[in-house]
Amino acid sequence: MRPPAAPVTDATIAAPDVKVEIRSLNFFYGAQQALFDINMTLENRSITAFIGPSGCGKSTLLRVLNRMYALYPQQRAEGEVRMDGTDILADQVDVAELRYRVGMVFQKPTPFPMSVFENVAFGLRLAGSARGARLKERVESALRDAAIWDEVKDKLHVDGRSLSGGQQQRICIARAIAVEPEVLLLDEPTAALDPISTLRVEETLQTLREKFCIVVVTHNLQQAARVSNVTGFMYLGQLVEMGPSSTIFTSPANRKTDDYITGRFG
Amino acid sequence: MNRRQLRKARNGLFLALSVAATLVGLACLAAILWTLVSNGIAGMSSRVFTQMTPPPGSEGGLLNALYGSAIMTLLGICMGSPIGMLAGTYLSEYGRSSRLSTLIRFINDILLSAPSIIIGLFIYEILVVRMGHFSAIAGAVALAVIAIPVSLRTTEDMLNLVPAGMKDASAALGAYPWRTVISVVYPAARSGIVTGLLLAIARISGETAPLLFTALNDQFWSTKLNAPMANLPVVIFQFSLSPYKDWQQLAWAGALIITVTILVLSISARMLLSLLQSDRGGKP
């Protein structure tokens, strides 16, 4: 059980560029603790990358930010995660509304059993935010932003599942950004992609950085170094070190971080 | 005999036993099918599909029974499978590990293996006795009660096959569970759901005992749902027990029709299912 709920709207006004502030976050899968006392801030118009060996809790951290874990009854989070000053872990938060503001792209492409167009329009239809010509416009611009428009513009009506893996993943990115979320979470978005598709997705992220607060989990250190401005290194459920990517990848303060990025373990 | 030879001999013995058991089983099945086909074909004629069940000694067919079976099966499926499908949806999508789900699964398993004569008696008690007469409606309700657990089980199994990632992705876009179920899960499991429907139809179209207590039989053409109605299984039951040669012929023909129908339904269900499994690969 979480301690008594803190007031939802906080009096302390967050600094203008801070989108998300995490305070003493602990996370449990049943009895097993997966995150230990995480404290950090995520900024607007920036890309934050989380690196670390498998099982270190990076994906878990992402799943807290849109409360995906709430779909599974044995999983629970303790602590505070403030988005624009509001604690999103509070019971009274409408998770559907939260997830509409916090988009997510998964490691495996997850196209829905419907046409390419309907896949991307799915979130927009849910929110009822666009219809008719406006809907088409938003779908097209999302597909362009995800660098997939040229490949699918002539087959918008085909089943999304019939595309290649790389195309499917970019459709999923388009689907996530079509609703213009405030925060975009990407869980190893290019793990299943070929180098060219990976490059496209990375370029996409660079364009999107101007609009969103982007958080990406990756096993690919070069990718983290290439795309992110802030990098956090996680190990055994703890945030070991976090700072500007240029610092983390050249002169990390912590010995473990150094060992990891130089390939001595992990 | 050394150790290795002994093990080899044991293996040979087990192989021989299991092959023998398989052969016995297959031989029984072949004998049944052969008797059914040879006798059924002999009784088959265009009259079977165009004339009513006759009194002993005169010519006739099974038209009223075929019609009655079709109507009651259709009604039974229309009543039973929506309940089964919705309950299966609850088990798979909402209450995956709740205590209520465990209870529902347990009760469903009992219902699934309950002797159908018990279900016939149950409907007899709660419908036939209160209405004061046998009726097609009571027959359809009895068939529905048999269809519910079949359709519940297949629906749950098929929805469980839909990748969790797909459901998560829908939730991650801010979809409430009902929206995910209708827009994502059902379409993804479409062929599985149709398979379940076919299996349920196959299951109830051969049931005799529940109809014996509910719809009974009618010698003549009747479309009244509020009255007894002819149906294949009960006609087969009565005709085959009779001493009349021509009635027995018709019973064989009816048995062949039911068997072929169920065979066709089961084979299409299997084909759909293998289609569904090859879909799993992602690309067509």
Image: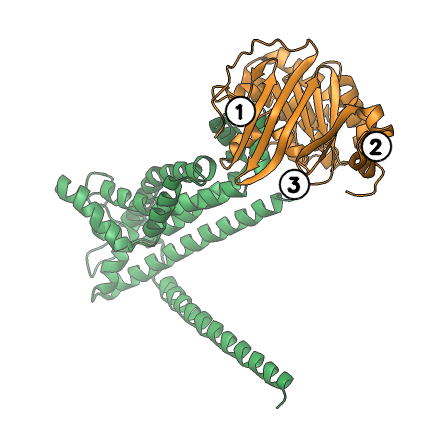
Task: Give the residue drawn at x 59%, y 21%.
Answer: A81
Tag 2 residue: A222
Of all chains, the one bearing label 1 is B
Chain A, colour shown: orange
B128 or A135, which lies in front? Answer: A135
Local secondary structure at mark 3? loop
Tag 3 residue: B282
Chain B, colour shown: green
A125 or B55, which lies in front? Answer: A125
- Residue A139 % position (x, y): 66, 18
- Residue B173 % position (x, y): 58, 24
Q: Residues within 10 Å of mark 2 (few under 14, many from 20)?
A: few
- Residue B90 can be seen, yes or no: yes
Question: Viewer-nearest of labels 3 and 2?
Answer: 2
Considering the image in quadrants, where does the C terminus of chain A appear?
top right
Tag 1 residue: B175
Q: Residues within 10 Å of mark 1 (few under 14, many from 20)?
A: many
Q: Amino acid at mark 3?
A: Gly
Of all chains, the one bearing label 3 is B
Q: Amino acid at mark 2?
A: Gln
A111 or B9, which lies in front? Answer: B9
Task: Give the residue drawn at x 51%, y 38%.
Answer: B190
- Residue B280 % position (x, y): 61, 44
Question: Viewer-nearest of labels 1 and 3?
Answer: 1
Q: Amino acid at mark 1?
A: Ala
- The lab-note entry on whether marks 2 and 1 share a chain reads no
Q: Would residue A102 be found to the left or right of residue B209 on screen?
A: right
